[in-house]
Image (tube, rainbow, N blue to C red):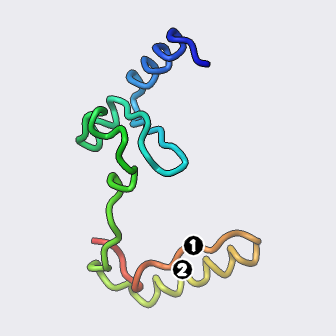
Amino acid sequence: MTSPLATREFRTLLDVAVDAVIIIDQRGIIEAFNRSAERLFGYEAAEAVGMNVGRLMPQPQPCTGLPLRRSRREALRRSNMRNVQRGQTPNPEPSEHCLPH
């Protein structure tokens, strides 16, 4: 069991952190949300705790950016082939061969 002092100290550390800190459970439900997260996402901790972290993530959008030039697509393919040869994971292909705008 965690002591009240340890809980207060942990909460203080969360609140003074410069970076946003979000703690979720195994189902993706937010259990802790610090002040930096409040500023970044626009929710107060009381609102965010209990909601699914997926609500904070942007939904995938269809590509509306610029088409990749043929030379860029070829460079990506060559880079991925080198990665595979080195036993590394290939880079994901841009959606519909385009760059975000």
Q: Image quarter for residue 78? A: bottom right
The foreground one among 9 and 68 is: 9
Quarter the N terminus occupies: top right
Total numbered labels: 2
The foreground one among 41 and 8 is: 8
* On screen, residue 26 above or below 78: above
Q: Which residue is mark 2?
A: 76
Residue 41 position within the rendered picture, expressed as x and y whole percent measured from the top left: 28, 44
Q: Which residue is mark 1?
A: 91
Furthest-left residue in this view:
42
* On screen, residue 14 above or below 68: above
* Label 2 Cα crowd, 10 Å radius (few <14 / some 14-19 / many 20+): some
Q: In screen coordinates, is 85 left or right of 91?
A: right
Q: Mark 1 and mark 2 in contact? Answer it, CB < 8 Å.
A: yes
Q: In screen coordinates, is 1 left or right of 71?
A: right
Q: Tell me which residue sits at (44%, 20%) in the image.
A: 11
Residue 96 position within the rendered picture, expressed as x and y whole percent measured from the top left: 40, 85
Q: Image quarter for residue 47? A: top left
